[in-house]
């Protein structure tokens, strides 16, 4: 068996022990004589699967008891609509403004989707410098000035541009965050947030399930006309089983969480993630060919975009294309940057081993010698 080093931003690399266990249980999971793919979601065989997955997530993230954990569908993109529908359109929020901080493509999409349902205030943006930093909270946006706000939304880690928040906004209204590309990568105080949501396909498991962690007092405020599938209260009341959930994806998330716990949990993975990122950024900062466009205080642990040094645009594009092609031939795949920004990007999620980053650096050093 030959496996490549997969630097995709998502769907992304999964831990090899997880894949091996899933393969071993494909036809007979837990002695049931059937695959998890075949189980009824309401059966006695599947119930322990979803319960164990939630229990592990609560343990690893230290989720307080007054928060619900929901396993939903539609990706983080559906949450762009569910959040404003459930907590900004009526009820306790009273139709107040939804505050968004624009730090990249997904943050911008979230704000635009929310604007279909409620008033949106994009209170700060880093678009002026191509999203290479996290903007300061405006001077007038102190906690006392937020009385007219329904919630405050940030994208904690910006997958495409490779930035992350290092200090959370201090606001008296619920803080909501998309944590798809950084969940479980380092410690996070869940109690600072009203809602956290994450598509699984980056750090949790395969595509198909979206995790929502929501404080209980924010449940039950959707307008009566809100479709049932878009209401947090219905999903919470039904234990994520209002309809058939993505059973196999939830099972795979459980295996990933089990792997992470056995590894040593958040403390252990944090050390590994910093080791990988520090190593890669150190190479980029000393390279004569490649560089990171992101301002140092805001660099992501998970997603590292990089560019070739400036020069003739046509030759630069040719060089970057050749790099991605040769890297793939050498076993380093999915290094092309997002189509909206170009360049290259290495996503080094939890499951990417240190050896993968080391090998990529060695390849880049060799490539650089032939290009400079």
Image (spheres, rainbow, N blue to C red):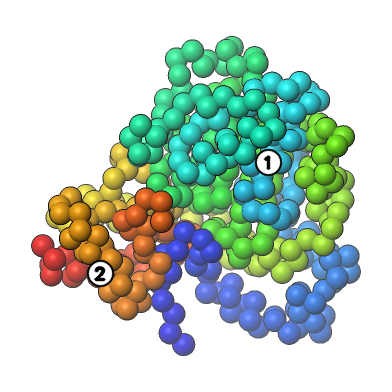
Give neighbour class at mark 1: few <14, some 14-19, many 20+ (Cα, 10 Å): some
Where residue 296 sits in the image (x, y, percent)?
Answer: 30, 40
Within 10 Å of disc 2 (Cα), the crowding (few <14, some 14-19, many 20+) is few
Which of these two is toward me, 189 or 136?
Answer: 136
Query: In the orientation shown, which residue stands out farthest toward the left?
Result: 372
| Residue drawn at 63 percent across, 77 percent down | 21
The answer to whether residue 168 shows anywhere in this view is no
User: Front-most of 288 and 354?
Assistant: 288
Residue position marked by numbered label 1 in the rendering: 81
In which quadrant will I find the C terminus? bottom left
Image coords of residue 116 (percent x, y): 66, 34
Q: What label sits on residue 322 in the rendered view?
A: 2
Label 2 SS: helix
In the figure, 267 relative to 156: above or below?
below
Q: Secondary structure at mark 1?
A: helix
In the image: residue 215, left or right of residue 273: right
Q: Residue at horizontal 81%, vertical 25%?
A: 91
The vertical placement of 58 against 113, above or below, is: below
336 lies above or below 39: above
Cα distance in 3D space between marks 1 and 2: 40 Å
- Which of disc 2 and disc 1 is earlier in sequence? 1
Place residue 216 in its image quadrant: top right
Residue 112 at x, y percent in the picture: 58, 36
Residue positioned 24% across, 51% down in the render: 291
């Amino acid at each position: 068996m030959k496996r490549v080093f997969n630097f995709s931003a998502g769907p992304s690399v999964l831990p090899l022990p997880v894949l091996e266990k899933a393969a071993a249980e494909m036809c007979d999971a837990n002695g049931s004589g059937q695959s998890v793919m075949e189980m009824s979601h309401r059966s006695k065989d599947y119930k322990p699967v979803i319960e164990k997955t939630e229990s592990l997530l609560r343990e690893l993230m230290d989720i307080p008891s007054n928060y619900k954990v929901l396993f939903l569908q539609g990706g983080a993109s559906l949450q762009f609509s569910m959040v404003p529908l459930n907590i900004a359109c009526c009820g306790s929020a009273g139709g107040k403004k939804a505050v968004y901080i624009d730090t990249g493509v997904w943050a911008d999409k979230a704000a635009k989707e929310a604007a279909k349902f409620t008033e949106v205030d994009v209170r700060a943006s880093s678009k002026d410098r191509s999203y290479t930093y996290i903007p300061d909270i405006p001077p007038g946006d102190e906690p006392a000035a937020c009385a007219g706000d329904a919630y405050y939304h940030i994208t904690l880690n910006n997958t495409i541009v490779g930035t992350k928040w290092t200090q959370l906004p201090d606001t008296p209204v619920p803080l909501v965050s998309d944590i798809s590309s950084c969940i479980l990568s380092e410690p996070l105080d869940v109690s600072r947030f009203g809602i956290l949501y994450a598509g699984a396909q980056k750090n949790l498991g395969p595509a198909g399930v979206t995790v929502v962690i929501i404080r209980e007092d924010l449940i039950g405020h959707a307008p009566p006309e809100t479709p049932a599938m878009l209401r947090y209260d219905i999903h919470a009341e039904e234990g994520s089983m209002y309809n058939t959930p993505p059973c196999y994806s939830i099972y795979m998330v459980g295996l990933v969480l089990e792997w992470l716990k056995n590894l040593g949990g958040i403390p252990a993975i944090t050390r590994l993630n910093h080791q990988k990122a520090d190593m890669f950024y150190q190479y980029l900062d000393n390279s004569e060919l490649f560089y990171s466009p992101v301002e140092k205080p805001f660099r992501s642990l998970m997603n590292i975009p990089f560019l070739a040094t400036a020069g003739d645009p046509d030759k630069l594009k040719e060089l970057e294309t050749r790099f991605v092609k040769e890297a793939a031939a050498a076993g380093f795949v999915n290094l092309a940057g997002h189509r909206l920004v170009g360049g290259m990007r290495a996503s080094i999620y939890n499951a990417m081993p240190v050896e993968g980053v080391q090998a990529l650096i060695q390849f880049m050093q060799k490539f650089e010698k032939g290009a400079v």
